[in-house]
Image: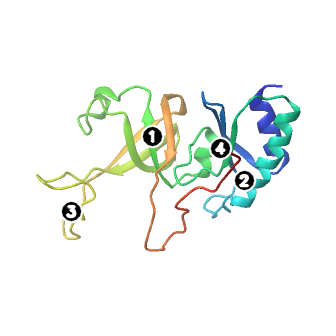
């Protein structure tokens, strides 16, 4: 059985979902797990804990040894705050969240001069459309000497909303934007849970 199938089956058997499997040249296996999504939109999903990672690590160590998989180190972790979005189900789960997307090809002249013609990266709110998905954002113009993230006066007229429609086939990568709210309005883990063996 292929490594991906073995890991996926083992993780699913323990009640988790495989998010990512990475095998490094140095022999490290990095496994990212998440709790399955029940399909309810807007519900705060429970987070993967260190105990969850340890449980999966122990079972994978046994399974990989039985299957004679050659590796030096096994790391099992949660997706963290910049979780990758891989398929339609991930996009449905995180609709309404702020995401970072990277297109395979620049958008060209299709944006009617609203954004740089060679632009591939966008951060905005993920929304479903009739034809697929879109990100919606505002680009606040910077004044000379002003740094990104500068607070904009409330009296100033906000920049217009912009939207970019896309299909999943047009994406090179999509991730939740790693935004941490230090004011406590929204619970977000600052570091992923990780378990590994030396």
Classify the position of the C terminus by image quarter. Answer: top right
Q: In the rendered image, which residue does mark 4 sit on?
A: 89
CA–CA distance in space, label 2 to label 1? 28 Å
Q: In the rendered image, which residue does mark 1 sit on?
A: 101
Between 160 and 35, the one nearer to me in the picture: 35
Q: In the rendered image, which residue does mark 3 sit on?
A: 157
In the rendered image, which quarter is residue 30 located in?
Answer: top right
**96 shown above or below 115:** below
CA–CA distance in space, label 3 to label 4? 37 Å
Position in image of residue 36 (x %, y %): 73, 52
Residue 35: which disc? none
Residue at the extreme front: 198
Q: In the rendered image, which residue does mark 2 sit on?
A: 53
Q: Are marks 3 and 4 in contact (CB under 8 Å)?
A: no
CA–CA distance in space, label 3 to label 2? 47 Å
Position in image of residue 142 (x %, y %): 18, 52
Which is in the foreground here, disc 3 or disc 2? 2
The disc, 2 or 1, on the residue closer to the chain's N-terminal end is 2
């Amino acid at each position: 059985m292929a490594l991906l199938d073995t890991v996926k089956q083992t993780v699913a058997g323990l009640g988790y979902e495989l998010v990512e499997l990475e095998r490094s040249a140095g022999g490290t296996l990095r496994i990212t797990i998440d709790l399955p999504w029940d399909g309810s939109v807007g519900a705060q999903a429970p987070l993967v804990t260190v105990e969850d990672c340890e449980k999966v690590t122990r079972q994978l160590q046994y399974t990989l040894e039985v299957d004679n998989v050659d590796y030096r180190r096994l790391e099992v972790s949660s997706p963290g705050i910049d979780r990758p979005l891989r398929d339609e189900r991930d996009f449905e789960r995180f609709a309404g969240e702020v995401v970072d997307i990277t297109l395979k090809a620049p958008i060209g002249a299709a944006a009617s001069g609203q954004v740089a013609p060679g632009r591939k990266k966008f951060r905005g709110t993920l929304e479903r459309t009739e034809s697929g998905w879109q990100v919606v954002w505002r680009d606040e113009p910077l004044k000379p000497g002003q740094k990104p993230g500068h607070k904009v006066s409330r009296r100033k007229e906000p920049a217009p909303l912009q939207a970019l429609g896309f299909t999943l086939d047009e994406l090179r990568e999509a991730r939740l934007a790693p935004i941490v709210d230090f004011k406590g309005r929204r619970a977000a883990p600052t570091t992923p849970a990780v378990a590994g063996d030396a």
